[in-house]
Amino acid sequence: MSSPVVPHDALATLFRDHHRWLLARLCRQMRCRWDAEDLTAETFTQVAASRTPLASIDEPRAFLTTIAKRLLFHLRRRRDLEQAWLAQLRHFPEAFSPSPEERALLLETVLLVDRAMQGLPAPARAAFLYSQLDGLGHEQIALRLGVSLRTVGRYLRQAWRCCLADLHAEAAR
């Protein structure tokens, strides 16, 4: 099944008229031309793959800005997670430190789990993270969150369902 494609002429016109503007805007925001170029390219890639008829867009710069802001949010979130992950790895004794390949796989897994849990309420995310990252039991999680054991169980089931649904969706791609 192929993804929808925006008509070439409309996309070319949008790109020609607004690429330089978007790139300059992102360069100012990000203070890194390479990242701004990547984000600009990804913005137009998402426009090309979208189902939005470009002729119906009254404010193309607002449309592009919205897409770019969402991408920038995800980029910053990913970098924050990477930095947190790297900070945790510094606590490992060198003999037990994962190889660069293992680090990349582990980081990708952390990012997949993070993405899967975006739709969860904060307490359910916290319960899952306490359980999986901190190794806390249900009783300890209940005390930290100020909820019942039954609620902790519900939160964890909800988080696992979210993760499994996302894994199935990822495997289907």
Image (cartoon, rainbow, N blue to C red):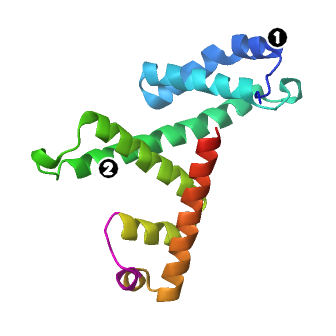
Quarter of the rendering containing residue 61: top right
Q: How far across and down, in percent of the image, does residue 38 sit?
A: 51, 22
Q: Which mark is residue 56?
A: none
Within 10 Å of the Cα at label 1, are there few (<14), some (14-19), or many (20+) other Cα atoms? few
Residue 138 left/right relative to 15: left
Residue 16 higher or lower than 143, as above or below: above
The residue singled out by tag 1 in the image is 9
Q: Is residue 169 magenta?
A: no
Q: Earlier in the sequence, mark 2 or mark 1?
A: 1
Residue nearer the viewer, 63 or 156: 156
Q: How far across and down, in percent of the image, does residue 142 sit?
A: 42, 84
**Quadrant assignment for the C terminus:** top right
* C-alpha distance separating marks 2 and 1: 43 Å
**Quadrant assignment for the N terminus:** top right
Residue 166 higher or lower than 29, as above or below: below
* Farthest right residue in view: 56
Q: Residue at x 54, y 66 (%)?
A: 159
Q: Residue at x 82, y 10 (%)?
A: 9
- Report the amino acid beneath label 1: Asp
- Report the amino acid beneath label 2: Ala
Secondary element under disc 2, as helix, strand or loop, is: helix
Q: How far across and down, in percent of the image, does residue 111 sit?
A: 45, 46
Q: Residue at x 11, y 50 (%)?
A: 93
Residue nearer the viewer, 3 or 48: 3
The residue segment tinted magenta is 133-141
Regarding residue 61, the answer to whether it shows in the image is no
Residue 66 left/right relative to 5: left
Picture mark count:
2
The residue singled out by tag 2 in the image is 84
Q: How far across and down, in percent of the image, does residue 69 sit?
A: 59, 37
Regarding residue 35, the answer to whether it shows in the image is yes
